[in-house]
Amino acid sequence: MMKWPLALFSELRVQPLQEVLLAEKKLLLFARWLSRDYASATTIQYVGEVKKAHVRWLGVPLESMNVAFYRLPMLFRMLKAEKPGKKRQKTPWEVGNFDRVRTAHGRQARLGNFGGGVHGFEKATAYTVMLVAFEHLLRLNEVVRTQSGTAAEKHPLVRILHSGFDLCTVGGRHDRLLFCFLGFGPLRPGVTVRLIVHYTLIPDACCPLGLRVAFAADSDVKIIKDHIEIFVSEDKNVDARNRRYVPIPAGVLGVDTPGDLEYYLKVCQPPSGGTLFAAPASPLKKINAAQPFTGTFNKNPYTASCAMVRRAFLRAYPESEEDEQKLFGGGSPRKTLAQLLFAIHRCRRMVIDFGGWADGEQQAVDSYFHYTLEQRCRILQNMLDDLVRVAELPAIDAAVCTQA
């Protein structure tokens, strides 16, 4: 209609701002046109396919060309509000449905008479097996009529992780990494912001971005194999005889935290020997693999954990009220993980061990009940599936994330 060329960008190069804005304008108009006839999820999927096609045609991610779209997410949120996805609707599996199944076996079977002999026994057995199969197939007395929403729609923590941070900026990378340490550790804010990192970047063509991260032995934070290992030497209930090692594996609620840490060290490059979460002096500075951060970091420990969590919540839920935002604080991710673990496992001992809380009712035998690093990693990696399995994910409310 507009007689625009099919490709958003005519050549492979770092795009000027005007070209990026024009390309985004085309996608905005395309999405708005689609939304007249399609659901919001379908519209968002089609726009995503257009972006994927350009990655295939150009052979490089759009970010490497300094292309980042900021108005598209705003339009997507508006479309979701205009045409929200269908929520789960259920109807009970009633006795009358069993009767209809039995009717299919004939008039006598409907009266409970399957006949005698081997043939009658086989019919009765087949009928019983079919009822059991139907019972399990229909998920224990429920018929699901519509597809359930995504995990991001069911719990604020998941949506914040995936929508609450601008990962194209050094500040966004800093904030989500901090949020993951607070939530997946789970660590107290005062402890997390004082973690010291000692590392060296070594050129290595075999590693992502051509760099390998080597951690010093005295670093509080390290990447070991496929997980982050955090050494906590100062905290409540921690002393010289009882220090904590906290792992954060990849894949917790869909986030690759070890990969995020490695990327942050390679591209943002906080000063080695300082606190890992020192605040960048220019948090809105754009970054990508071809454009590392060249600014400075504050030398004092980070003190804005509460503001960071509320800012992420507001970005993920722009329609939220101020009273809702006040429910969140720096300790909210940590307390939310405790709530999620208890919702799945109903084990007070597990929650205490994960969070490093004191147990006033501890007995001598409880000193043996500690989870290994491998066990903690498995529990965290399986958490999302476990929440869906026990049907707790939709029921947990943001109110569990009380003010720290």
Image: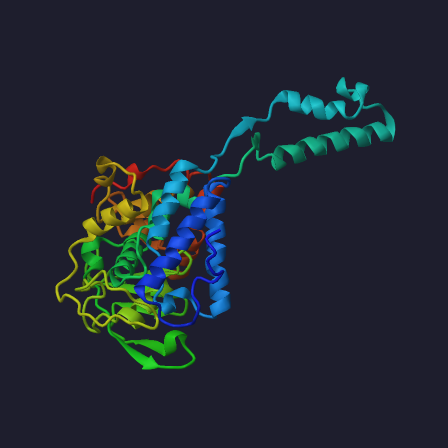
Q: Nearer the viewer, residue 245 or 249?
A: 249
Please indicate, yes or no, whether residue 135 appears anywhere in the rendered image: yes
Q: Nearer the viewer, residue 325 or 36?
A: 36
Q: Nearer the viewer, residue 280 or 384?
A: 280
Asked where in the image residue 272 lies, by quadrant, the reply is bottom left
117 sits to left or right of 73: right
What's the image's color scheme?
rainbow
> What is the x, y in percent for residue 321?
25, 36
Note whether 149 is above or below 173 in the view shown. above
> What is the x, y in percent for residue 154?
40, 40
Please indicate, yes or no, whether residue 343 appears anywhere in the rendered image: no
Which residue is at a point 23% across and 60% down the rendered structure image?
284
Which residue is at a point 37% across and 68% down the rendered structure image?
65
Looking at the image, the residue that sits furthest to the left is 300
> What is the x, y in percent for residue 31?
44, 48
Which residue is at a point 25% across and 71% down the rendered structure image?
269
Asked where in the image residue 225 lies, by quadrant, the reply is bottom left
Note whether 207 is above or below 254 in the view shown. below
Number of numbered labels in the structure image: 0
> What is the x, y in percent for residue 106?
80, 22
Note whether 103 is above or below 217 in the view shown. above
86 sits to left or right of 216: right
The quarter in which the C terminus is drawn is: top left
Looking at the image, the residue that sits furthest to the top is 111
